Amino acid sequence: MKKWMAFCLLFLCLSGAAHVCAETIAEPGTPQSAREDLIDRIIETGRRLYTQANGRLQRAQYAGDIYICKNFTVHVFRENSASFRMEEYPAVSLTVPSNLPAKECKPYCYGYCWQDVPPEEGNPFYAAAQFLYDTSLTKYENMQLALEFMRQVRKGDYFQMSADYYYGVGAHSAIMISDYDAETGTVHWMDSNMAGEKRDGIRYGKVQFDMEKDIAWWADAFCKKGRGATLYRLRGDIIYYGE
């Protein structure tokens, strides 16, 4: 009887494992989803702008300059979003929310998150993960939370942080172009104006693509008192529109 029960339990476990595999591993030739297509188009637009820049710094000074970090992430989205909608709100054009105003970020510094725009107003993103420095914890404990936050990175995530690091102090926006790589402990991203310089009082930024850094490098940038970061991810109900 015990052997029979053990066999039944083993059979159920194996059946469950097979069910999970069937759901999580795509069959060869599975059509690309609209969501995946939108992400790939966004990344390709970023790659094209990077190629066009060819290492030359681009103006990132004025409100309309697309090479300011947040403007860059919004631009590559707008260049591709017209062909997509949310299935739940098919009549609404997609948009990227602006950063939350500084006065509304307190007690944290400006730049760690976006305005809370509801999906019915066109926001196709949701906050998939967030880190905020907790003064009730030790520096080490905060760092462990920050590292775990960075392990949540997935391809297509919009990354927003308030940082104090090698490249400066303040807000920065980037787009992750692949999932977190557990084997190397790194993430790959694209952005603009993380690095740059001023010429005659005008800021010029560098366009970056397929950059790779250890997650500890990122975590150290925002794992500081008053700072934090958020990962924004596209909803799963992205559909084609007008094609």
Image (cartoon, rainbow, N blue to C red):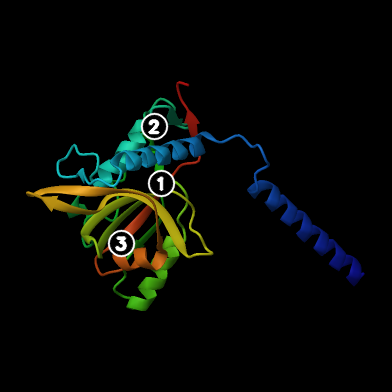
Closer to the eye: label 3 or 1: 3
Q: Quadrant of the N terminus?
A: bottom right
For label 2, the residue is 80
At label 2, the amino acid type is: Asn
Q: Mark 2 vs mark 3: which is more N-terminal?
A: 2
**Res. 226 mark:** none
| Callout 3 touching callout 1 (CB < 8 Å) | no
x and y percent of residue 38 in the render? 45, 36
Residue 237 visible in rendering: no
Q: Residue at x 49, y 31 (%)?
A: 239
Q: Is residue 139 above or below residue 20?
A: below
x and y percent of residue 166 in the render? 25, 65
| Callout 2 touching callout 1 (CB < 8 Å) | no
x and y percent of residue 154 in the render? 47, 52
Apparent side of residue 241 relative to residue 23 in the rendered image (left or right): left
For label 3, the residue is 228
Place residue 163 in its image quadrant: bottom left
At label 1, the amino acid type is: Tyr
Q: Residue at x 23, y 45 (%)?
A: 68
For label 1, the residue is 126
Place residue 67 in its image quadrant: top left
Closer to the eye: label 2 or 3: 2
Decide which of 100, 229 is in the foreground and name it.
229
